[in-house]
Amino acid sequence: MTCLFPENPLFLRKVVDFMGDGLFILDNQGQIIFWNRSMEQISGYTGSEVVGKTCNLIPCNKCFGKKCPEGIDACGIFEKGDEVLKECTLRHRDGFEVPVIKNAAAIQDENGNFLGVVETVTDLTALHQMRLKAQEAARRSGTIAQHGKIVGSSQEMQKVYSLIDAAGTSDATVLIQGESGTGKELVASAIHDGSHRHQAPMVTVNCAALPENLLESELFGHAKGAFTGAVSDRIGRFEAANGGTIFLDEVGEMSPYIQIKLLRVLQEKEINRVGENGNRKINIRIIAATNQNLYEAVQSGTFREDLYYRLKVFPIHLPLLRQRKKDIPQLINHFIEIKNLSSGKHIQGVSSETMRFLLDYTWPGNVRELENTIEHAFVLCTGATIEPNDLPIEIRDPTRSSTIATNENSAYPRRRKLTKAQLLECLTAMDWNKTDVARHLGLSRTSIWKYMKKYGIPLKPPKDR
């Protein structure tokens, strides 16, 4: 292509400065030699601040290959071809993520010698906001019934979806609160999948499943010889999640000592392996979850106040299933589809009488209990629809359930204390299936384990030991 173009550097500079897209150029050493005005607005960095540095200054969540400081020769643009065009996010100087379309091309002379790289960046912030508004409008009209693996189109869930979308745009620490079975891990996964860390791992740790000494090693790792059995160095879950997200489930069960160590991670973004003196920097996003009322735990002195406020930078509260009964038919259809695929059956739905039982039940075990109920019905159902007799007895006769929430509006309903005799009676009746016992009593499986430990009840029945 031939065109007449003034050979005036000032003219060319004004042309590129008036471009709506950001534009910058790297030399053959990978250092920035040009940075236009739009790049200053998109990145927050002025040209004088970036010239002579690498593009690692504004990390891209989908960069080509190895990190820029390792050298321009390691940049994956040479493997991708002459041009690379993709939608991604860039890190602004102030720490937030900017959605962009990034176009990069390697420049060579007529002899094939590498001269540098030219990149253009299109800011998609306005388009991204329009997408979020469109999604919100669709949810309000009821046209979106699922968010990732979370099912429901009720007003209560629309609020949760909005919070998930907002949390995905930042690295703020999130505290998910809600009863057992409300889907806290699904919400954590949705936040991670919608964040710029989605290509990095999300590591899950159940803080109630391990005693203090094992949980410390699990979270922080240990050095060889740190304790008996530590025959080699081992990385912890924080290091395994580096670059991604760590999900701390049942964070309210942490001991005071582990709470102090977690507080340091939140404050300093570094960890210290058990038996090791040096600190290790980590780059992670922390999402915590609890079925406890942590504010009450702070008031009673069992949870640190400073840690509580560090965790609840962005709180999300999940509604009880009985507070969003509009979603029950959608959830039933969802679980039936899943069970049809795994069981080979072809159940089409539930009868109207069965639906009435399911809608009238109070669901102390929330969505998890509903899923278990459908699984129970699949075992018994021999027809095309699930009938009342296919349901567990406590669904058909709520008076058989030992725990009905006394306060429908409370997110943390009070339950009576479980005695050893009552627990043994339930374990025997449920053939020592702790999941079924927990569902029947409206407690978490962890709570059942804790009661068994408290009363000295073995995990297996006498005939199996």
Image (cartoon, rainbow, N blue to C red):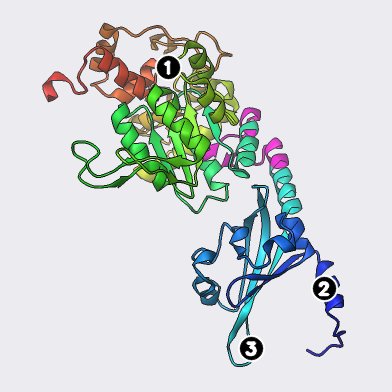
Q: Residue furthest front?
A: 277
The crowding category of the residue bearing disc 1, from other C-alpha atoms within 10 Å (few below 14, some 14 to 19, many at least 20), is: some
Task: Examine the image and state in which quarter residue 170 appears.
Answer: top right
Secondary structure under badge 1? helix
For residue 333, say whether it is visible: no
As drawn, 110 above or below 21 = below
Judging depth in this view, the residue of 318 and 441 nearest the camera is 318
* Discs 2/1, front: 2
Sequence-wise, which precedes: disc 2 or disc 3? 2
Check disc 2 and report the residue beneath it: 13
The region drawn magenta spans 136-158
Sequence-wise, which precedes: disc 3 or disc 1? 3
The quarter of the image holding the N terminus is: bottom right
Judging depth in this view, the residue of 354 and 143 nearest the camera is 143
- Dot label at residue 204: none
Secondary structure under badge 3? loop
Task: State the image coordinates of residue 40 (x, y, percent, origin top left).
Answer: 75, 59
Does the residue at mark 3 contact the one at mark 1 (Cβ under 8 Å)?
Answer: no
Task: State the image coordinates of residue 297 (x, y, percent, origin top left).
Answer: 48, 16
As drawn, 129 above or below 29 = above
